[in-house]
Image: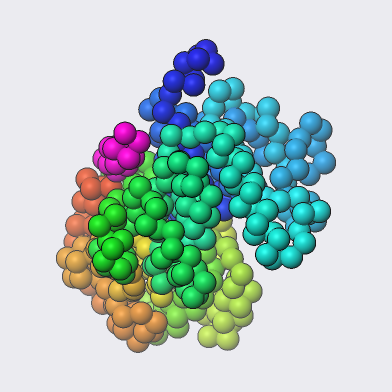
Amino acid sequence: MSEKENNNKKHIAMYIGSLQKGGAERVMTNLADYFFEQGYKVTLVTTYLAADEYEVKHAAWKCVPAGADEAELVADPDENPVWVDPHGGEKGGIDRVFSALLKSEQKGRAYNLKMRHKKLEEIWKEINPDLILSFIGKNNIMALSTATKEGYKVVVSVRADPNMEYDTLALKAGMLSTFGKAEGIVVQTTAAMNWFPVFLRGKCTILPNSVNPSFIRKRNVGDREKRIVMVGRLDSNKNQAMVMEAFKEATAGDYEDYILEIYGDGPDRLKLQRKAENLGIASRVKFAGVVKHVAEHIEKAYMYVLASNQEGMPNSLIEAMSLGMACISTDCPCGGPADLITDGVNGLLVPVDDAKEMAKAMRKLLDNKVLAENLGIAASKIQRKIAPDVVNQSWKDYLDRKMK
């Protein structure tokens, strides 16, 4: 393709902190690949390069270890020993720009913020996108405060509970002072939309996450394995600790041959391992870590559990339901699980941080295999609503309207 043809494409810049593995980052990388394949020019703008990132299929760069030849440093190697080779990926593919400051520019918080604003302003002018799509908290404020005054259109997306993303007075004030400048605000649930004041609510649109194509498959039939699984970052919000307590109670007696399998990694790993030992169930709790091809690892398990204290629209729950698993979730704010699950029809909902009720729900499914099977069959119907072609088309229609 000629440079002229490339310049005539609609150009979307997608802005996020990094592509480190997480729900919002997965959605953005999926959207980047989709829009590129639809003939758009796509530039990913991230603050930094993380050590464990999602792969971007059409990336025009390659991540390489620190010290590799002909690579550019994009973060402090003492903190993040990863480099990027700007010529190591797909020619003419999805480009990437970094807004991280050099270490020599770190002279205090106020100075750093000013310089980050200046660098982002320079980035927007350099890449000159038709639209900027920003994800998550502070990034949304930064995008609006640096791009809209230069006339660039910005759509912001709140990917979790707004109370989490704007959890301080400073962040809430920044949101209130900038979101009015947005072309649109994308949220994932009705509750998230209603969190905003009336003057911003009219800018809100609910767009769901699409499921990863690897989770679109025929439902596993036949006997299920004696495993209860969770997938997510190991931290207090995901509340694996509460599930371990519930698991011990629910499986006492008749079901002590079941194991709890926890996929993911995070800051609470050692704490959770110690808790499993203290509960006397360490031999029945498996910390599986981060794995590729998650669907293959979990699809034959007996049930799936999400225990978050707060969530937006949880990708892991969508994926488990798409596989046709019997699912239990906390009915957490800002309403994502409740938008997905009708209690007793295609899954079970339990109160947040309630080990007793979680244990009752787990025992209910263990005692009633017919119920677990029926819930899984009903859950699998979600595929029709969140298939990638359906959801991605919704994003395309929406962003195309904003670029006119």
- Residue displayed at 30% across by 74% down: 331
Q: Nearer the viewer, residue 76 or 354?
A: 76
Q: Find residue 84 and report its horizontal and vertical position in percent.
A: 70, 38
Q: 243 or 312, which lies in front?
A: 312
- 363 to 336, vertically: above or below: below
**Residue 393: within the magenta?**
yes
User: Looking at the image, which residue is at 29% across and 56% down?
Assistant: 204
Percent across and percent down for residue 348 are 25, 71
Determine whether 315 is above or below 73 in the image: below
Magenta-drawn segment = 389-404
Report the residue at 47% width, 16% height from top: 5
Q: Is residue 347 magenta?
A: no
Write down the quadrant of residue 114 in the picture.
bottom right
Residue 150 shows up from this direction: yes
Apparent side of residue 389 relative to residue 128 in the rendered image (left or right): left
Q: Main secondary structure of the magenta part?
A: helix
* Left or right of residue 28: residue 344: left
Residue 397 in percent (x, y) is at 28, 37
Residue at image location 33% in from the left, 57% down from the top: 187
How far across and how far down the image is residue 189, in percent?
A: 28, 61
Residue 320 visible within the image: no
